[in-house]
Image (cartoon, helix red, strand yellow):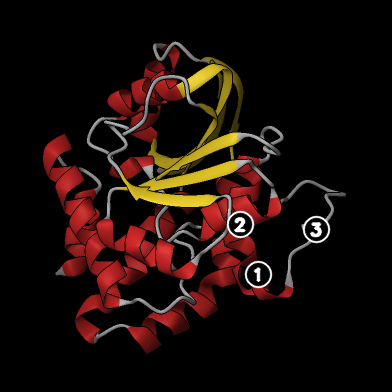
């Protein structure tokens, strides 16, 4: 039953979609509070030849593929000394990686889930890292305050992608960068592109990275399946398998058949 509810979340009206996704993330953050679950994305594996392996601290190796997606999105521009905002920071692992490894002056993560923010504040204390609760469609910041806005696998939860992009444009400084990555059904791609074209932001890069994400899902499948089997009650296993896009899930199969695409865009204000 919960599996069907999760799949239904992907096709809802804006208000109901936003509300139910928030409930889902609140529930997950409350149910599993251990600090070993740091990331909630599908991961990324570089497939180009002669790409050097990303050097990570020993404690980050178990999360390599998740971190590689953050690194791919965040390094669209040099973040050193910048004011950076991540919208949809989840459990905080990505924002913490960016703050620690890419050296922004200030890294701010916001998330719609209060429980996620509490977990993030508890698990990550860095002098340049800050978390606060906030709505992606009504960002709680003044105009033109950030050099870079990051958004990693979060926007599919929003009620209005158009409102979110307008807010990104508002809070970015002139010349600022918006780096975005997320998945969409193939039927949604044209509408997404139209939203971006009317955003007032200049598109400077676009890539489909579905093969990179699929490879990460394949490599992580056994560990994610084991995590779900070990840490979730029977009634929740099916929903978590879809949420995690494990092999044989409908989400995973939709990536394989290109019914769902994983896209990456970079924009400049």
In the displayed orientation, state which residue is furthest to the bottom: 230
| SS at circle 1 | helix
Mark 2 neighbour density, 10 Å: few (under 14) some (14–19) many (20 or more): some
Contact (Cβ within 8 Å) of mark 2 with mark 1 = yes
| 158 versus 166 height, above or below | below
Q: Position of residue 9 (x, y in %)?
A: 21, 51
Between the C-alphas of marks 1 and 3, the distance is 14 Å
Q: Position of residue 57 (x, y in %)?
A: 73, 69
Q: From the viewer's perspective, is 14 left or right of 269? A: left
Disc number for residue 97: 2
Q: Residue at x 32, y 32 (%)?
A: 139
Q: Residue at x 41, y 79 (%)?
A: 34
Q: Is residue 83 visible?
A: yes
Nearer the N terminus, badge 1 or badge 3? 3
Which circle, 1 or 3, is nearer the viewer? 1
Residue linked to disc 3: 53
Contact (Cβ within 8 Å) of mark 2 with mark 3 = no
Between the C-alphas of marks 2 and 1, the distance is 9 Å
Which residue is nearer to you in this view: 87 or 125?
Answer: 125
Q: Residue at x 65, y 49 (%)?
A: 71
Count of labels shown?
3
Q: For the N terminus, give its image quadrant.
A: bottom left
Between the C-alphas of marks 2 and 3, the distance is 16 Å
In the displayed orientation, state which residue is furthest to the front: 127
Q: Position of residue 41 (x, y in %)?
A: 47, 57
Write down the quadrant of residue 235 in the picture. bottom left
Disc number for residue 124: none
Q: Position of residue 104 (x, y in %)?
A: 64, 42
Q: Residue at x 73, y 50 (%)?
A: 47
In the displayed orientation, state which residue is furthest to the right: 50
Mark 3 neighbour density, 10 Å: few (under 14) some (14–19) many (20 or more): few
Which residue is nearer to you in this view: 85 or 194?
Answer: 85
């Amino acid at each position: 039953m919960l599996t069907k509810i999760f799949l239904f979340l992907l096709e809802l009206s804006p208000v109901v979609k936003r509300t139910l996704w928030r409930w889902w993330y609140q529930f997950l953050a409350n149910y599993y509070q251990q600090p070993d679950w740091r990331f909630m994305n599908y991961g990324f594996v570089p497939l180009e030849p002669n790409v050097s392996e990303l050097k990570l601290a020993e404690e980050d190796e178990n999360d390599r593929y998740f971190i590689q997606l953050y690194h791919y999105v965040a390094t669209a521009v040099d973040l050193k000394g910048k004011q950076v905002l991540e919208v949809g920071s989840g459990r905080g692992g990505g924002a913490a990686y960016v703050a620690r490894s890419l050296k922004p002056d200030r890294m701010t993560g916001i998330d719609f889930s209060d429980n996620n923010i509490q977990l993030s504040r508890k698990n990550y204390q860095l002098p340049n890292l800050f978390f606060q609760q906030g709505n992606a469609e009504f960002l709680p910041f003044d105009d033109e305050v950030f050099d870079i806005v990051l958004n990693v696998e979060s926007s599919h939860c929003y009620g209005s992608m158009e409102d979110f992009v307008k807010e990104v444009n508002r809070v970015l400084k002139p010349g600022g960068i918006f780096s975005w990555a997320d998945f969409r059904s193939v039927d949604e791609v044209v509408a997404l592109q139209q939203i971006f074209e009317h955003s007032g932001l200049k598109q400077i890069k676009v890539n489909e990275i579905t093969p990179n994400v699929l490879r990460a899902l394949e490599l992580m499948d056994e560990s994610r399946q084991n995590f779900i089997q070990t840490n979730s009650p029977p009634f929740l296993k099916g929903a978590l398998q879809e949420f995690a896009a494990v092999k044989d899930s409908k989400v995973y199969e939709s990536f394989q058949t290109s019914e769902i695409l994983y896209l990456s865009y970079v924009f400049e204000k």
